Each structure stands twice: as C-alpha cells, then as structure tokens.
Amino acid sequence: MSYPDLIELSGFGGDFERYIDAVYAAYVDALVRGNLTFLGKPISFKHAPATDGKGFAFWHAVSEAGETEREDDRTIDLRRCERITWAAHMLEAVGNDGSCGDIVWWRPPRVRKRVVVWLRGDNYAIVLEEREQFWLFWTAYCVKSNRARTFSAEHASFWKL
C-alpha cells in the first residue's frame, strides 16, 4: 500500500505557522471529514479544548509529551506532522482479523478499552479508545525501536501468534 507524500516544512519555505495550518487542514480533510470507521463503529475526534483554533486530538497527534506529561508542555514533532494523513490510510486498510499486510492492530494489556493500529515497516502507530457507540481518536506517533519490540510482543500475545 502506498501512503501520501510527507508534508514537509521545507515545502513551506520554513514558515512554521503556514506549515502547521496546512498540516491541520490535511488532518481535517483526511481524518475528521474522512468518515472513518473501525470494527463497524465511526471514529470521532476530540476538539475541546482547542488551542489556536485547532482541536485537542490534532495537537496530540503532532506533538509529544514533555517531561511533566502536562498537556501544555507538549512539543511539536515534525515527523508526526509529516505523516498526519497516514492514519486515514491505515484505518481504511486494516482488517478485522488483526492485520492487513504491514498494518496490525490489537488491544494493549494495560488499557483494554484502547486499540493500537501499527504500521510495522514504517513504525507509525495510531491509538483509538473505544466508547459505546464510537471510537475516539486518541493520538498517532512514530514508534521508537524499544517500543516496537513491545508492540510486536503485545500484538503476538493478543492474537495468540
């Protein structure tokens, strides 16, 4: 499966504000307005509290936690920004049986109401949280090698591979 091109800051002449606006527009188009579903339920996106007119889930998907783990202490991660539209393609492709090629999903043992959808080859993951009538898009991020080992073990354990 091919993925959309990366949305790179260099394509905006280094203008960070214009870049973030473009990344947000891509997020809204591909994800929020994408009519995405997972396991037969629609996917919803938390907007409040918004920052700079951009929804909460967006900021979670393009930034990483700081040392304090406080929401106002997050740092923009350009690798997350570049890949923001990949989440829609992954969710459209993944199957109910736990995989679709290099895309797999499972429920992590620590938080059973969540699922992780992982693009193994490119180490990019999405986290959804299950609600009664829908899934809440929690975050998306680039997976580091130590986390990839954990993911691999959790996936295998969940599907009894």
Image (cartoon, rainbow, N blue to C red):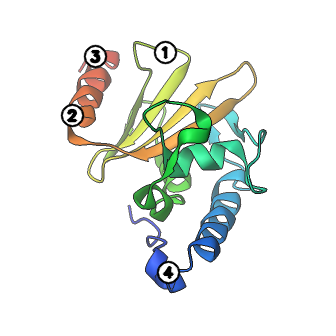
Quarter the C terminus occupies: top left
Mark 3–mark 4 distance (CA, rounded to whole Å): 44 Å
Q: Earlier in the sequence, mark 3 or mark 4?
A: 4
Whole-percent x and y of residue 21?
A: 67, 69
Dot in front, 3 or 4: 4
SS under mark 1: loop
The kind of residue tagged 1 is Val
- Residue 8 vertical position relative to residue 45 in the rendered view, above or below: below
Dot in front, 1 or 3: 1
Mark 4–mark 1 distance (CA, rounded to whole Å): 39 Å
Whole-percent x and y of residue 50?
A: 76, 46
Quarter the N terminus occupies: bottom left
Determine crowd level at label 4: few under 14, some 14-19, many 20+ residues with C-alpha closer than 10 A.
Answer: few
Q: Earlier in the sequence, mark 4 or mark 1?
A: 4
Q: How many marks?
A: 4
The kind of residue tagged 3 is Ser
The kind of residue tagged 4 is Gly
Q: Say which residue appears at 66% left-offset and 62% top-offset.
A: 24
Tell me the tag on residue 157.
3
| Residue pointed to by mark 4 | 14
